[in-house]
Amino acid sequence: MMNSIVDRLKEVRSSIESACLQSNRSSESVQLLAVSKTKPASDIRSLYHAGQQQFGENYLQEALTKQQQLLDLTDIVWHFIGPIQSNKTRDIASHFAWVHSIDRLKIARRLSQQRAQDAPPLNVLIQINIDDESTKAGIQPEQLVEFAGEMAQLPNLKLRGLMTLPAAEASAQQQQQSFATMQRLYSELASQYPTVDTLSMGMSNDLESAIKAGSTMVRIGTALFGARDQTRSNE
Ligand SMILES: *Cc1c(COP(=O)(O)O)cnc(C)c1O
């Protein structure tokens, strides 16, 4: 079992490479975000030492605890990818380099106000509710143009692109359609905003099709860290 997490990192990287090859893309065009929610700091450290630099967390308190344990890894890059309550924005603005889950202007404004002036701008992605699920976060595709226009005004945020979390029960056909819509929204946005270079799409189960549809960042949890314990308590 020694090094198994590092073996899984190699496997995930090679899946990314072969998906890139199949769609005639360079393997540098897709970044790997390791989603470490519910997993210990020691796992993050192992992956970091194997060359993984970018990590995604969903729950603020849990993330802050792990960040404290990993302060010596000064060039680790933290991404916040979970739902955001307004009383959490201050900590998110100061402890993360990226936020993927923005779907309310109120939250975006607070993050911009609370980002330290001497820090680089916070990299932000707009979350799209691509399958129109009532239980899921994200704006509707029709709202994107106006929403992005407002976001682009905020001085301490840098609009980098879009994120989506497709319906878990979608058929292969529906999933392809959703990914294709995301690809279109993303290229329209990128043609309007030069800072936009990131489409955060694809997880352990659908990374190949996401890469075929133009994803530039896959968010991988289970395939790297193993299955998560379902019974986590709320923070
Ligand atoms: C948990 C999570 C992931 C990782 O999902 P896996 O299926 O474990 O790879 C990706 N994105 C978001 C937003 C998540 O919450």
Image (spheres, grey):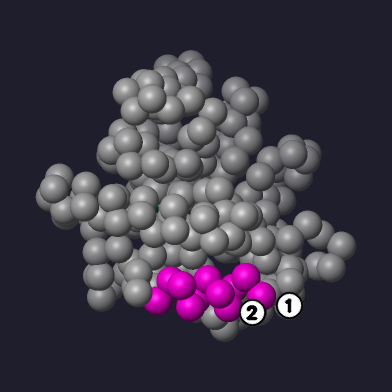
What residue do we see at 30% from left, 56% from top? 181
Looking at the image, residue 8 lies above or below residue 190 = above
Check disc 2 and give the amino acid type: Arg
Mark 2 lies on residue: 109
What residue do we see at 48% from left, 42% from top? 217
Image label count: 2
Percent coordinates x, y for residue 159 in the rendering: 60, 61
Q: Secondary structure at mark 1?
A: helix
Check disc 1 and give the amino acid type: Gln
Q: Which one is in front, 63 or 75?
A: 75
Looking at the image, residue 161 lies above or below residue 3 = below
Q: Residues within 10 Å of mark 1 (few under 14, many from 20)?
A: some
- Specify start and end residues of the magenta stretch as a single range: 143-153
Q: Are marks 2 and 1 in contact (CB under 8 Å)?
A: yes
Circle number at residue 113: 1
Percent coordinates x, y for residue 178 in the rendering: 25, 55
Q: Secondary structure at mark 2?
A: helix
